Image (spheres, rainbow, N blue to C red):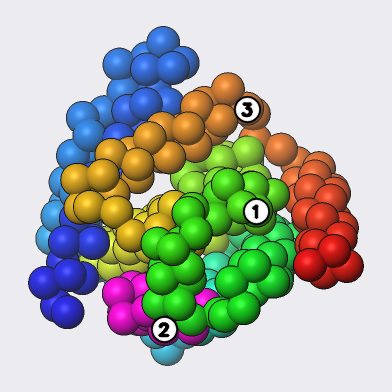
């Protein structure tokens, strides 16, 4: 399992680099090399590390390890085919990380990021629609059972495309430079990560690389099914590039617009799931 975690971290960081490069190319800029995020982790790992005197020292450090821990757990849940509720429960814990990051440093920029992380909880609403739709079709919330259903009946992305769209919105909301990424908007510097530097920032980059890999891999497993390693890599890259295109051509929304759009989209998907429950 350690080997899987290491591969997932490097793959996630590389995906972040490809994401940045794709956005830059779409916007007519050269952009950084695709391995830049890996270099960032190595660079931050050896830079001077400190804790601000205004920070809650325990929370400031602990939240970094919590971030790594929850996404490592999410990867284990995926690889072992455990309950979808466990996977999304881990995902919901990430909100604690986002909030704790902002509050732990004492920085006003971090506090604004923490407040916005609460507002951005609207992006989690589509998760419930995804869970409900998958259960109504497959009669199970075990990832192993969902994979087996798709082997027998075909990809869920064809059976319940609105549920796939719901999870796609969730993944988009957690991408860097997303139109929904209000917690890291430039007017609040780096938002909830403003004060985390040195080895703490390297740890956060590792956790967020894992997060990106897990979310993309979860989308593939849940809505396309078990495919070969090469096909998984190709589909993951195509999925990432589609997200990069949206991030490149869409400006970052205000917190109010972010919540409005996400709740509106979630409402449509919830209505679809309710109709499914009536007719199935």
For the question of whether residue 196 can be seen, the reply is no
Q: Residue at x 55, y 49 (%)?
A: 157
Relative depth, front residue between 270 and 14: 270
Report the magenta residues as a range: 72-84
The residue wearing badge 1 is 160
Helix, strand or loop at label 3? It is loop
Q: CA distance from mark 3 to mark 2?
A: 36 Å
Above or below, comparing residue 83 to residue 182 in the picture: below
Helix, strand or loop at label 1? It is loop
Q: Residue furthest front?
A: 152
> Residue 259: x percent and y percent?
79, 52
Dot in front, 1 or 2: 1
Relative depth, front residue between 109 and 221: 221
The residue wearing badge 2 is 82
Q: Residue furthest top?
A: 28
Relative depth, front residue between 153 and 53: 153
> Residue 236: x percent and y percent?
35, 45
> Residue 118: x percent and y percent?
71, 67
266 sits to left or right of 94: right
Looking at the image, do the residues carrying marks 3 and 2 touch, with CB atoms under 8 Å apart?
Answer: no
Q: CA distance from mark 1 to mark 2?
A: 21 Å
> Pointer 1: residues within 10 angstroms few (<14), some, or many (20+)?
some
Helix, strand or loop at label 2? It is loop
Q: Earlier in the sequence, mark 1 or mark 3?
A: 1
The residue wearing badge 3 is 250
Q: Residue at x 32, y 28 (%)?
A: 21
122 sits to left or right of 134: right
Q: Earlier in the sequence, mark 3 or mark 2?
A: 2
Q: Residue at x 55, y 68 (%)?
A: 98
């Amino acid at each position: 399992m350690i080997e899987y975690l290491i591969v997932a971290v490097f793959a996630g960081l590389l995906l972040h680099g490809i994401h940045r490069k794709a956005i830059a190319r779409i916007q007519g800029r050269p952009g950084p090399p695709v391995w830049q995020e890996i270099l960032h982790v190595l660079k931050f790992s050896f830079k001077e590390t400190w804790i601000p005197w205004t920070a809650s020292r325990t929370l400031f450090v602990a939240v970094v390890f919590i971030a790594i821990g929850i996404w490592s757990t999410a990867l284990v849940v995926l690889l072992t085919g455990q309950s979808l509720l466990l996977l999304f429960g881990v995902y919901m814990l990430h909100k604690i990380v986002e909030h704790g990051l902002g509050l732990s440093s004492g920085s006003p920029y971090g506090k604004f990021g923490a407040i916005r992380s609460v507002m951005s909880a609207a992006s989690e609403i589509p998760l419930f629609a995804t869970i409900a739709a998958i259960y109504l079709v497959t009669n199970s919330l075990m990832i192993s059972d969902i994979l087996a259903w798709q082997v027998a009946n075909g990809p869920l992305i064809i059976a319940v495309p609105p549920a796939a769209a719901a999870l796609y919105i969730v993944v988009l909301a957690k991408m860097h430079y997303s139109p929904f990424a209000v917690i890291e908007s430039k007017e609040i510097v780096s938002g909830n990560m403003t004060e985390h530097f040195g080895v703490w920032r390297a740890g956060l980059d590792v956790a967020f690389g894992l997060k990106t890999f897990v979310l993309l891999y979860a989308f593939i497993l849940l809505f396309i099914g078990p495919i070969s390693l090469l096909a998984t890599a190709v589909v993951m890259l195509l999925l990432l590039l589609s997200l990069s295109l949206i991030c490149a051509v869409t400006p970052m929304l205000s917190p109010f617009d972010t919540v409005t759009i996400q709740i509106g989209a979630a409402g449509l998907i919830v209505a679809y799931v309710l109709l499914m429950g009536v007719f199935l």
